[in-house]
Image: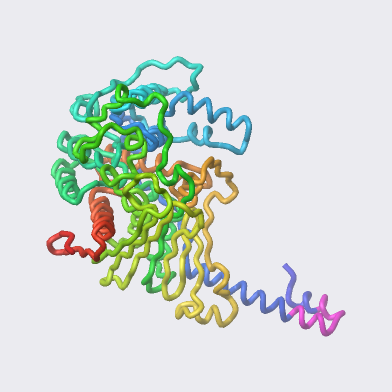
Amino acid sequence: MISRRDLIKSLATIPVLGAFAYGVFKTRRVVQNKQYILLNELNLDSAIPELYSDANKDQKIRIGLLGYGIRGRQLMRAAGFAHPLWIDEHINAARENPRDTRYQDFLDQEDLNIEITGICDIFDVHATEAMEAAANESKSGSAVKQDNFPKRYKTYIELIQAPDIDAVIIATPDHWHAPMAIEAAKHGKHVYCEKPMTWTVEKTYELRKVVKENNIVFQLGHQGRQTESYIKAKEAIKKGVLGKINLVEVCTNRNDPNGAWVYPIHEKASPETIDWKQFIGQAPYHEFSLERFFRWRCWWDYSTGLTGDLLTHEYDAINQIMGIGIPESVVASGGIYFYKDGRTVPDVQNTIMEFPDQDLTLLYSASLSSNRNRGKVIMGHDGNMELGQQLVIYADSASTRFKEYIENGVIDPNNPIYSYFPGQKHFDAITSPTEKYFAGRGLLYSYRDGKRVDTTHLHIREWIQSIRLNKQPSCDIDQGFEEAISAHMATKALREGKRVYWDYAKEQIVS
């Protein structure tokens, strides 16, 4: 290290510039020292903790899968079971592009020591594919002959009642989530249920009741609970880095047919291969429709719309980070402004949730016909946080806490005071705008020790570990109840065009 005396001697040969340069050097050193002090004060470098150990991992858990559509396939892969044709596709992708690590990421997933012993899907083709994926314990491609296929059940009740099933994964349309979860809980089966938790307000209370009465382990499918940047965000807020927070903005922006739920219709789908009566269930009757079967998210008859499908992800992220709970009141508006395809749920929506006891407002807005990236922003008196796969914190120019740092030039409000970029050198192989949307929100991958890991795998892993340890996971029935009620308040406000309220004492939605 150059000493102060040596530095002065070296600059003395150019008297004016030397003195000026030394002054700059000295000032810079002072600023850097104060920056180190600031970073130590923020103290945001703690490691991401593992929730549970691998205790009792020798206990094999037998799983029944309900639904093998788009999300069902993803959940199966996250649990360790991929269809042989998916293996073929991604081996070839890796050969063509060595930076495409999706196949290797799948192989690197932890073996959860689970077995898929039952499948139920009301579309014959999906049921067969699910059985083929479940039998692929070796993670091989189509060249390897598979055996040891799980049993296919024609109804969810038959699957739930099977004695060789310990737990179920529910990946069906929204209107079936609660009935299946309730039936499973009544039979003592543990439940991993995709979001949203419920389709109706009434089923929300019933599901919470039976889960608690039967002491089953319930995990709601908000895999953002495993996102590294969300965990760091919670730490920063707990330590008061942002100061008093009073406004949060979250959003959904997507701009492609898949992102707007216009999914492809399978060429083998017909009244002969689909159990339409079972699909309808408790929903209003409608004649057979391939559009409704594959694109059910577009109709209130089976869906919870933008609120249940996408707002719930954003709400749960903020609830995870800040513990906001159920809002006191909600207003919402929106309409079908782009996709004039017969759908009944909006493709544009705005929702405002008020939490007056916390001096907080949560704003949500969505468009399914714009890709403008807006992300999550948490605003406080001393700083604001931009949040997605990454985490960036800026000091507010009028901050009380950072006033001295700003005045001394240590902090520039236009530049971050803290940035967290997990896995920043890693290439994320994504193939569609919708995947890009989820990846940007940390809902596809997170990182552990610099290694990319599927967040859904981590979420299922937590659920499996919780079953073995008889604990409740991070997105348990109480967290699910808060998600479901908040979402139903937003849906009610949207559809009725008026403000709705939550009566905390009576636990009722009122308007």
Residue 21 covered by magenta stretch: yes
- Which residue is at the front of the view, 400 or 436? 436
- Which residue is at the front of the view, 276 or 136? 276
Q: Is residue 330 left or right of residue 132?
A: left
Give the percent coordinates (x, y) of residue 121: 30, 28
Segment colored magenta: 9-22
Give the percent coordinates (x, y) of residue 279: 26, 33
Give the percent coordinates (x, y) of residue 325: 27, 60
Give the percent coordinates (x, y) of residue 26: 69, 78
Q: Residue at x 39, y 36 (%)?
A: 70
- Which residue is at the front of the view, 440 or 23? 440
Question: Which quadrant holds residue 298?
Answer: top left
Q: Residue at x 37, y 58 (%)?
A: 349
Vertically, is 286 above or below 15? above
Residue 448 seen in the current view: no
Residue 296 covered by magenta stretch: no
